[in-house]
Amino acid sequence: MIISLIVLLLGLVLLVAGAEALVRGASKFAALLGISPLVIGLTVVAYGTSSPELAVALRSTLAGHTDIAVGNVVGSNICNILLILGVSATIAPLTVSSQLIQLDVPLMIGVSVLMFVFGFDGTIGNSDGVILFIGGVVYTLFLIYQSYKENNPEVQDEYTKEYGTSGRMSWSQGLINLALLVVGFALLLFGSRLLVINA
């Protein structure tokens, strides 16, 4: 029991470390190739930070533990809103944009209702998954389109400091970023395996 708990915690640590390495490597690649910092934030960073949930969901689904996959997605969303948002707001007041209230939050509620409807019969089938996936792609493309319309200099400066600017990538930079990507993927795969086996 204790050993399983220790291995479970190790899996969680590896997932976090893998996501960090993956985001770092991919973001620096994108920045050096001249991709807009806003697009990096909306795609590479956004999906990279969700990679632990994706890795666990895929691993558990392939292993036949679909209940873990669903619980992982629902639980992470509940934790993000109640725990992470709650702790952050306790430390300092959070600024809420008009787009968040008018678009993103209603969309989040709508997607949650859609998942409830899809799962009402006891399963979320292949066709349901296709609809959800297409919706995610469309939403991402919309965010990228919006980012080009509303180019925020403060966000540009923040990502330039964090990930650098576009330009020629040296061999050493390329190798380091490639190593981060490979290590990130490896840690995600191994961490998700430990987590699913010992959950």
Image (cartoon, rainbow, N blue to C red):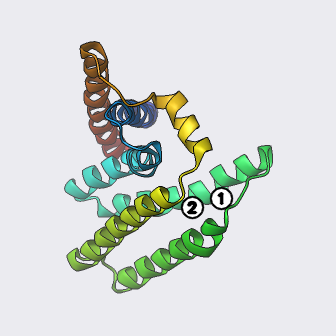
* x and y, in percent, of residue 182 in the image: 25, 29
Where residue 83 appears, x then y in whole percent? Answer: 65, 52
Residue nearest the observer in this picture, 157 or 134: 157
Q: Secondary structure at mark 2?
A: helix
User: 69 or 198, which lies in front?
Assistant: 69
**Above or below, comparing residue 180 to residue 71 in the picture:** above
**Labels 2 & 1 near each other (Cβ < 8 A):** yes
Q: Quadrant of the N terminus?
A: top left
**As shown in the figure, which amino acid type bears the numbered disc 1?**
Leu
Task: Please rate how many residues cluster around mark 2, counting C-alpha atoms within 10 Å: few if below 14, some from 14 to 19, many from 20.
Answer: few
Residue 28 versus residue 46 in the image, above or below: above
Relative to 103, does residue 140 appear above or below in the rendering?
A: above
Residue 173: name its quadrant: top left
Residue 80, percent from left and from top = 58, 55
**Residue 22, visible in the rendered structure:** yes
Q: As drawn, which residue projects farthest toward the top?
A: 172
Mark 2–mark 1 distance (CA, rounded to whole Å): 6 Å
**Residue at horizontal 32 percent and vertical 37 percent from the top:** 188
**Neighbours of disc 1 within 10 Å: few (<14), some (14-19), many (20+):** few
Direction from residue 158 to residue 196 in the image, left or right? left
Point out residue 141 in the picture as x, y percentages from the top left corner: 36, 63
Residue at x-position 28% and y-position 58%: 65
The residue beneath circle 2 is 78
Label disc, if present, on residue 82 of the rendered structure: 1
Say which amino acid is labelled 2: Ile
